[in-house]
Image (tube, helix red, strand yellow):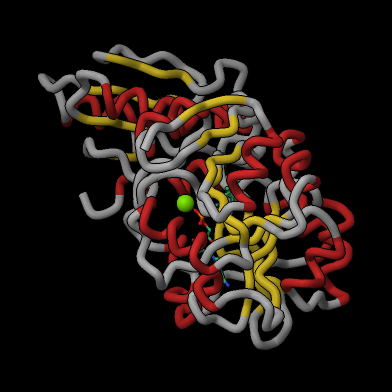
């Protein structure tokens, strides 16, 4: 299959209506989208991504009407929706029967968000159904933040990549769900800072241990480059790997190493998050033998950065 990249929203809409899988830009990362109500098309997402069927997808909705078609919306969710949508917040809510089991992996909840990227909003306007979309990377690898990233890995497997430029948030959406007591639970730190959410709804809890298999985004080894990744004190890690070609990922300061990528010299965690995945990919395809990253401040988007780096390093 030949993969084309372009900015033709009408063409992407036509392909999606025909049941094809199309890569779409969102403000967080690129998604691999299909009509959420077309099971055949959704199945193609799983095969293109080589994603296990136990890992459910996020449904991307255009508006309230589509939200209510896929989920039951508790009153407690209203403030979050009003404040953060469209934007990088995913809510795990009780599902409606119309959602195919394949999308939710048979769970009685559905993950849903309203994306903010203008091109994908224009695309949703041309469709009558929401889009199921995971990140547009092979399962387990780093998520794509440019159309080229998608082409590098999924070229030849999908017909079209809608090119909306580099993603402005750069890490995936924050995922919130509710526990049996109706308290908000953080399944995945992401593009909306936990502090902003807690300022609105009060304390957000950690998921119960038993909930973990229900959110496979929480799989330990994930978002992982092929090269070994180590997270910690950079000077100590550089001593440990002396003699090897080390690629360093640093927040604000330069280190003397084979390569050093500074994510934000001005010390802005949002800017650092925006650059993280591109830098991980770059170092992964460079001549570096080992990737070493510092631990970021555990606040704002630093939580999402630390989460992705920790998973990239897991099992090594
Ligand atoms: O920013 C994002 O969220 C991007 C863009 C494309 O929207 N999407 C994304 O999708 O990161 P994906 O599939 O890579 O990650 C979605 C995560 C998965 O880890 C999945 O386990 C979790 O959401 N998830 C989906 N439905 C769920 C549910 N019903 N309960 C718990 N977790 C769920
Ligand atoms: Mg993903």
Whereabouts is ligand 1, in terms of quadrant?
Answer: bottom right
Q: Quadrant of residue 10?
A: top right
Measuring 72% from the left and 37% from the top, which residue is drawn there? 117
Whether residue 191 is visible, yes or no, is: yes
Q: Position of residue 217 (x, y in %)?
A: 46, 60
Side of 112 where 296 appears, left or right: left
Side of 245 where 112 appears, left or right: right
Measuring 54% from the left and 81% from the top, which residue is drawn there? 107
> In which quadrant will I find the N terminus?
top left
Q: Nearer the viewer, residue 146 or 101?
A: 101
Whether residue 197 is visible, yes or no, is: no
Q: Position of residue 2 (x, y in %)?
A: 39, 32
Q: Residue furthest bottom?
A: 180
Q: Position of residue 37 (x, y in %)?
A: 63, 67
Measuring 51% from the left and 36% from the top, which residue is drawn there? 160
Q: Nearer the viewer, residue 169 or 21?
A: 21
Q: Nearer the viewer, residue 232 or 123?
A: 123
């Amino acid at each position: 299959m030949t993969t084309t990249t372009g900015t033709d929203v009408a063409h992407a809409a036509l392909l999606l209506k025909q049941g094809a899988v199309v890569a779409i830009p969102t403000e967080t990362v690129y998604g691999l989208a299909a009509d959420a109500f077309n099971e055949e098309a959704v199945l193609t997402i799983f095969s293109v991504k080589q994603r296990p069927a136990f890992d459910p997808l996020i449904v991307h909705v255009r508006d309230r009407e589509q939200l209510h078609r896929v989920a039951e919306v508790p009153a407690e969710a209203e403030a979050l929706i009003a404040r953060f949508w469209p934007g990088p917040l995913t809510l795990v809510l009780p599902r409606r029967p119309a959602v195919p089991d394949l999308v939710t992996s048979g769970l009685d909840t559905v993950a849903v968000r309203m994306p903010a990227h203008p091109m994908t909003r224009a695309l949703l306007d041309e469709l009558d159904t929401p889009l199921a979309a995971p990140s547009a990377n092979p399962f387990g690898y780093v998520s794509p933040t440019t159309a080229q990233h998608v082409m590098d890995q999924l070229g030849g497997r999908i017909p079209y990549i809608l090119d909306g430029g580099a993603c402005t948030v750069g890490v995936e959406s924050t995922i919130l769900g509710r526990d049996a007591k109706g308290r908000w639970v953080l399944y995945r730190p992401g593009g909306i800072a936990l502090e902003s959410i807690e300022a609105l709804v009060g304390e957000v809890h950690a998921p119960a241990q038993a909930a973990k298999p229900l959110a496979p985004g929480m799989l330990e080894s994930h978002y992982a480059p092929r090269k070994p990744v180590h997270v910690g004190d950079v000077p100590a890690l550089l001593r440990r790997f002396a003699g090897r070609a080390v690629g360093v990922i640093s927040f604000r300061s330069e280190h003397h190493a084979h390569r050093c990528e500074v994510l934000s010299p001005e010390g802005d965690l949002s800017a650092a998050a925006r650059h993280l995945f591109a830098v991980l990919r770059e170092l992964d395809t460079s001549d570096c033998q080992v990737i070493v990253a510092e631990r970021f401040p555990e606040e704002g988007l630093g939580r999402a950065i630390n989460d992705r780096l920790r998973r990239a390093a897991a099992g090594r």
